[in-house]
Amino acid sequence: MALLSDDQKLIQETARNFLAEEGSIAKQLRHWRGIGCSDGFGHDLWKQFAELGLTGICIPESVGGAGMGAVEAGLVLEEIGRNLTPSPFLTTSVAAVKALEGSAQAERWFPGIVAGETVAALAVDEGKSHNPKAIALQAKRSGNGFALNGQKQFVVQGKSADVIIVAARTAGSPGETDGVTLFAVEKGASGLELENVALADSSKAARLVFDNVQVDADAVVGEVDGGWAPLSRALNAGRAGAAAELVGVAAGASDMTFDYLKQRKQFGKLIGEFQALQHRAAHLYGEIEIARAASLKAAELLDAGSDSAELLVAVAKAKAGRSAALAVQEGVQMHGGIGMTDEHDIGLYMKREAVLSELFGSPRFHANRVAELSGY
Amino acid sequence: MPDLEQFRADTRAWLEANCPPEMREPMRSEKDACWGGRNFEFQSPAQKQWLDAMASRGWTVPDWPKDYGGGGLSPAETKVLKQEMARINARQPLTSFGISMLGPALLKYGTEEQKKHYLPEIARGEIRWCQGYSEPGAGSDLAGLQTKCEDKGDHWLVNGQKVWTSYADQADWIFCLVRTSTESKHGGISFLLFDMESPGVSTKPILLISGYSPFCETFFDDVKVPKDQVVGEVNKGWDVAKYLLGHEREMISGMGLGGEKVALGKTVGPIDDPLLRAEIAAFDVDSIAFSAMSERFIDQLKAGEAHPAMPSMMKYAGTELNKRRHELIMAAGGSDVLEWESERSKEGKAARDWLRTKANSIEGGTSEVQLGIVAKHILRLPGT
C-alpha cells in the first residue's frame, strides 16, 4: 500500500509542525552558519528531537526507542529537507543505528542516542567518490584488539560524534566485500587525527587519519570479517533516508519557486503566465512526485525485508538526486538575479542538494547499481 | 473472506472448463485481439467460443451491473477474476472502446433507456464503437470543434469532418462530439451517438509513418440522427467528454508501464557500448520510479486522495518514458532494427513500434496540453 496509515500521518504532521517552527532556515541553518559553529547544528534542537521521540525512531522499543522503520524516518527527513534543518538525524538516528542494531555496541550507545545526548557518525569513503567495496583502511590484530591505519573522508559530523563507526579491512583486498569489519571508535582515540571541514552547504564533515589507533576487541560491531552485512544495512537505510531528505529539499525549493512565479512581474505580467516557465514548472512537479513515490516504495520494501529493497533503494537515491538537482537548478534560474544572492534562501537549497546527492553514492553510482542488480 | 475464497475456487474451475487452450497462448500481435462488432471476422472458433462464454456471465465487463450486461461483481471479486485469468494466461475476451471509453460515460451520464439499449450490446461484443473527437481544426484545442449538428425538429442533422478516428472503417457506431450551439465554445458541444451505416457517413484510412493505418478521416454529409441519441444534456457534452478523456489518459499513461517488471537493460541483448549502458541505466531508474508512482497513483485514486489533474501528470510522464524506451531499443538494435521488410525483423516490428510511440504524446491530449493542465490546476500558475 503506497499510502500512509493514520499513525504515519500523525508522525508526518508532528515533524512538519516541529521543523517548520523550530527547524526553520532562519532559526537553524543561517543562525549556526552565521556564528561559525563548529558542529554546524544546534544541540538544543537535537534535545528537542529527543523529547518528541524522534532520535530513537529506528531503535527497538525494548531499548527505549520508538521501534519504527524507514518509512517513518523518511517522513521526518522529508521535513528536514524542506527546512534545510541541520541535525545529526540522518547519520546518527538512521545510518549509525542500523549499523549498531543487534550488536553488543548497541547497548552502549542507544540510550544516549534516544536521550539526544549522543552523536554517532559513519566513516566509509576513502576517496572523493563513494565506493564502499574499495575499503582499504587497515585493521590488524594487535594485543587485545586491533590497530587501525589509513584514512577516511566525508565523515559527516565526525567532529561532533561521540562514536565513529569505521569500516575497515581485516582480510581480503579492496574490491571484495568479505573481510570488511566495522569498529566503534570513540571520540578522542589516541592516534586519530581529525580535520573538521565546512562543506558547501555549511554542514560539517571530517577527514580522518588513523595512525596506529588502538581499539579493544569489543569495539568490533558484529563479526570480524563480516562487516559487509551491517554496513550494507546502514548504507541502505542511509540512502533511503537521504532520498527522502532530497525529496524534501526538492519540494522546499520548488514550492519557493512556484510562489515566486506568482509574485514576480516582468513585461507587465506575472512571470508564471509565461508558458516557457509553466511547462518547466509542471515537468518539475511531476519529477518530484515520482521521486517521492520511489522513495516511499524503497522505505516500505526495506521495512518489509523484501529482496527487491536494494534495487528500489538505488532507484530512489538516483531518482531523488536527479529530481532535487532539477528543482534547485530550475529554482535558481527562475528566481533570476535574486537567486544568485546569498541573502535569498533558494541558493541554500542548491548547496544542500549537492551534498546530499553525493552522500552514500551519487545518482550515477546508483544508476550503475540498478544496472548491476538487474544483471547488465 | 470465506465467500471470496469460494468465489475464487468457483471462478478457477469455470475458467478451467471454459477457456479454450488457444486463448491461453500469448497474443502474437494486436491482430489477435478480439474487437467484436457486426463485421468482425473471428480469427478462430476458439476466439468466438471464449467471447461468448465470458459474455454469457457478464465477465467481459465484470464490474458493470447485471442489468446492463455486466457481471455485477464487487471490486474484490473483479480483482479475483483478473488474478485467476492472469494465472492461466487467459487473453482478454474482448477489446473495445465501448468497454474502456463509452461504457463508463454512459454509466455516469446515460438515461436508463440508453444504458439498457447500448451497454448490453457492448458487453456481448455485438457493436464496435469508435470515437469522433478531433477535427482538422480542433486538435489540442478540442473544444474548438466545428462539426455542425442542427435540430431539425424530429431529428438531428450532422455535417462536418472528424480526424484521427481510431478504426472508424471497422466500427459500427460512433460516439461523437458535435456543435449544437455557437453561442459558447465549451457550452455549445453535445455528445451524440449514431450508426456508421447511416447515409452520409464515409471513412478514409490514414497511412501513418509506421506503415499502419489505425486511424481514419471520417466525413458526415447530411447525416440524420434520431433525437434520443444525445448523451447527457444538449450543449453539456463537454462534461461527458472531459470525464471520458480522464479515462483515456489513464489508459494511455499505462503504456509507459510496458514491461517495467523487467529492466530494459535485461531485454535488449548484450550492451557493449558503455555510453548506451549508462543511458539505459538512467532510463531504468526513471522507469522503475515511475512504476512506483503508478502504484501510488492508483492507491490515491481508490482512496479519493488523487488530485483531479493528476492523470495529466501521469499521461505526460508515462508517454514520454515510453518514447524514450523505444528510442533506446532502436539504439541498442543498431542496423538490425532498421530492417523494414524482412522476416528476420518480423517485418520491421521494432521500427514500426518505435514510430507508433511517437503518437503517445500527441493522442489523448499532447504532452504540452498536459503540462498546461498541471500548471493551471495543480500549481495554480496565473494566466489562461
Image (cartoon, coloured by chain):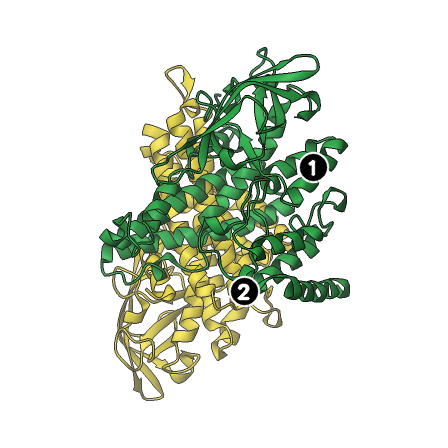
Chain colours: A yellow, B green
* Residue B149 rendering spot, x and y as whole percentages: 59, 16
Looking at the rendered structure, the secondary structure element under dot 2 is helix
- The residue under label 1 is B107
Which picture quadrant has residue A328? top left
Looking at the rendered structure, the secondary structure element under dot 1 is helix
Residue A158 has which mark?
none
* Residue A161 rendering spot, x and y as whole percentages: 41, 64
Foreground: disc 2 or disc 1:
1
Can the viewer see residue A354?
Answer: no
Amino acid under disc 1: Leu
Q: Chain of mark 1?
A: B
In the image shown, does A55 or B85 lie closer to the viewer?
B85
Task: Name the image quarter holding the C terminus of chain A.
Answer: bottom left
Residue A303 has which mark?
2
In the image shown, does A69 or A337 lie closer to the viewer?
A69
Answer with left or right where residue B281 lies relative to residue B36. left
Amino acid under disc 2: Asp
In the image shown, does B28 or B312 lie closer to the viewer?
B28
Separation of marks 2 and 1 at Cα, in angstroms: 42 Å
